[in-house]
Amino acid sequence: MKASLEQIVSLAKRRGFVYPGSEIYGGLAGTFDYGPLGVALKKNIENLWWRTFVDTRDDMYGIDAAILMNPKAWEASGHVAGFSDPLVECANCKKRFRADHLEDAGTCPACGKQGTLGEPRQFNMMFATKAGASEGESATVYLRPETAGGMFVNFKNVVDSFHPKLPFGLAQIGKAFRNEIAPREFLFRVRELEQMEVEYFVRPEAWEEAFEAWRTGMLAFAKELGLPEASVHELEVAAEDRAHYSKRTIDFEFDYPFGRKELWGLAYRTDFDLSAHQAGSGQKLEYIDEASGEKFLPHVIEPSFGVGRTMLAVLMSAFKEDELGGEARAYLALSPKVAPIKAMVSPLLKNKPELVEKAKEVRKFLQKVHPAIAWDDNGNIGKRYRRQDEIGTPFCITVDFDTLGEKPELKDTVTLRHRDTGEQERLSIEEAAERIRASLA
Ligand code: ATP
């Protein structure tokens, strides 16, 4: 059975993954706050992405650009003039909607009245603010609506510092802001979001090969995150639906409970961005081939991943309900690589100091493999297991009297319980460490 959005929202709040933003003040639409387990899950997703697409490759360069940029950059890129969605307002209830998301353009989805929705007008989604201490001197600046801009403006810097050979890419993870007309569906459509993006620069004639490599790379990453192949779909975006500068776009869609919707995007952007920033800044952004002396603007392949949409897809895919030992349970079958906690260590009884001391020792030992090893000595063992199942901890390790040597042949062994099956094995502390290490490799 597939999880409903309500089940995920409720689990996320109850167990400290994601809370509504500014909740004690009644919230702020389109914002969410990540709690302790959500931070860990998000960081693990981001770290896996960075390791996959940056650290383990020789052709990728990391960037962490400022969120506030010179507004001329957004004029050059076309965002000031055109980063907009069509907005309609209902004359009766005054609610606003995205015209292209309406199921029936003749009926207001909020009040149900017919014929009250006005003509669509373009609504720019960039958040504007003021930079500078006094109102008079201050200039309008924008919170970036995507991380891409920060990479294009640093293209020349990276080329000058590192002299990379084509093809090569810049990568960035960071916040972006979009004043969405109708934020909704939990982390799916928010106003403050996080993106993981790459601008991959290629010789113009080599774009197809690079596009294909990124397409398969993105599918492989979906698999590594634990998204079922059957839930991820490629949508070849038709020419009339593509941005004017894009010669090819694939939307990777995921089967969310509210429909099949865009998870990530992959676009061939030609030399649109470098050429626009070259014209806007007056700076030469051409790449010079050191061997031939040839000068040209590289073309760009852009894989773009939303962190929140990824996390929601990961949670949806991992949520499972079954029956274990005659009792119903809900658990998250998260890949150990992204699970917030890698294992939990527990003394069989919390009022036996020898057990507690030994269990602490075991935990310390396992933390050499990974620091995210939790401690739980509350309630009975069964309850502890269920708590960890619900947050997706792959292993629970219990220290009992045999660990202390009550049966001499079992001295320094522990029980290791597997989350998905509930099965337990008796193994040495070193073997338990090895199980955790192997699960993260
Ligand atoms: P949509 O059509 O759903 O509004 P988009 O095509 O505008 O999305 P892009 O501009 O391609 O999205 O942004 C790249 C990625 O950033 C998306 O694939 C998605 O993962 C993420 N993203 C974009 N807008 C949002 C948002 N409002 N909330 C959460 N994630 C977002």
Image (cartoon, rainbow, N blue to C red):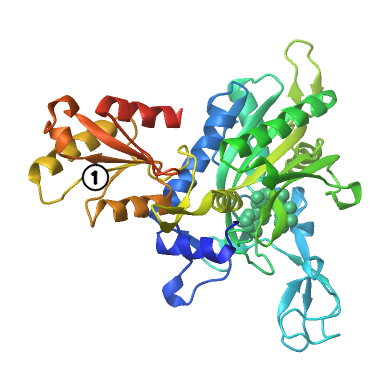
Image height of 385 relative to 31, above or below: above
Residue at image position (75%, 35%) is 301
Does residue 14 appear in the picture of this structure? yes
Which residue is under mark 1?
346
Of residues 73 and 100, which is closer to you in this image? 100
- In the depicted structure, whether residue 407 falls above or below residue 185: above
Q: Residue at x 45, y 70 (%)?
A: 22
Q: Quadrant of residue 81?
A: bottom right
For the N terminus, which image quadrant?
A: bottom right
Look at the image and tell me whether residue 74 can be seen: no
167 relative to 31, above or below: above
Residue furthest to the front: 326
| Whole-percent x, y for residue 42 in the image | 49, 47
**Picture coordinates of residue 56, whole percent (x, y):** 55, 24
Q: Tell me the amino acid under the disc marked 1.
A: Ser
Specify whether 294 is left or right of 46: right
Q: Nearer the viewer, residue 328 or 233?
A: 328
The residue carrying pointer 1 sits among few (fewer than 14), some (14 to 19) or many (20 or more) residues within 10 Å by Cα, namely many
